[in-house]
Amino acid sequence: MEDTELASVTTDRIEQVLLEGEATVARVRASQMRLLAELDQRQVPLMDGARNLTEWVSARMDLAPETAQKLTQTATRLTDQPQLAEELEQGSISFDRVAEESRLVGSGAQPELVSLSRGWSIAGIRRMAARYRRISRQDEQDTYRDRFLSIQPTLDQTSYKLWGRFPGTDGRLLDEALTRRADQFPTMPDGKRCARTQRQADALVSIAQDSLEEAEGASSSAPLVSIFVDATLAANTKGEAGASIDTGPRVGPLTLEEILCDGQVEILKTAEDGTPVSVGPTARTITPKLRRFILHRDGGACTADGCQSHYRLQPHHVIPRSRGGTHHPSNLTTLCWFHHHVVIHRNGYRIDPHSPPQRRRFLDPDGKDPP
């Protein structure tokens, strides 16, 4: 059906064409699986140097490994399930449904249950098959052996990507821990909540910071952050380029402000050719004594209006140092980790300097009035 014809075609006809196409796919898959079964019987994959039929299919048919595995495993199961194979050849049932129903049959489910599966969605068949699937000790060991967590920076090191695989119980534990921590975070100053995935990302960072803080608490030295600044590039871009921390990641103005807000910092300025221009002294931006005073003065609680959190309380500059703010107590206030790290230093909100000291309000990054 050409694109030029679609405007005049009814919705019912479009749906009918889609279903006819899926029936054609089913018949083609049935034919492919018959051929694959014959090739496997002739041991063609082994003669071609492949370890198994799935590997051969993936290479020869240019399929993703998971698609090749689904195709070959279903072909194997259908040799003992001729009725499903016949329905697939007729195009009366989709390949995906055949794949899941054959898995359900192979799991040992009773015939009565299998007959009811036509009334379920494919996701429902998967859930039922999972209940019947036997898990041996070797299966569990293999699952645990395949666990991994990969952390990879982007090419410019301005962000990191994470992905991985965990055994079921460990994955559930991780999910519950992140969800529980994420649910403790309050709403943003505009009254909205971040997306669940964003809150879980923040939760993972906060748990990691807790772990580092516990380890560093046992040592006498505080964490040191080295900031390397290309003086010319940073000056011409107002800090949007030319700055990186000692482990490599490039940072922008928001991250620079957060690093300078609290901690032990040394700044190393370089010229365009990398030649050191100056090395600033290693110093705490807020001394431990001043930090304790600010936390005591503010009652050991977050001063954001309406916040009751005591989690990871940190002093913050009402007027940022990049805007001329000082370490004077009148320019410092206590914020919890969420309002300090997420709201201000990640989402760009600023404290309204005219708000009451114990009811700090926030200015929207877009310049709107606080809610």
Image (spheres, grey):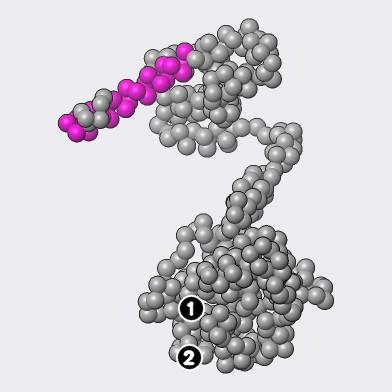
Quarter location, residue 330:
bottom right
Mark 1 surroundings: few (<14), some (14-19) or many (≥20) residues within 10 A: many
Looking at the image, is 162 positioned above or below residue 309?
above
Quarter occupied by the N terminus: top left
- Residue 142 visible? The answer is yes
Reply yes or no: does residue 262 show up in magenta.
no
**Label 2 vs label 1: CA separation?**
14 Å
Looking at the image, is 156 positioned above or below residue 336?
above
- The residue to which callout 2 is attached is 356
Quarter location, residue 44:
top right
The residue lying at 64 percent from left, 44 percent from top is 165
Reply yes or no: does residue 20 show up in magenta.
yes
Mark 2, secondary structure of its residue: loop
Q: Which residues are magenta?
A: 7-31
**Farthest top residue?**
42
Percent across and percent down for residue 160 are 60, 54
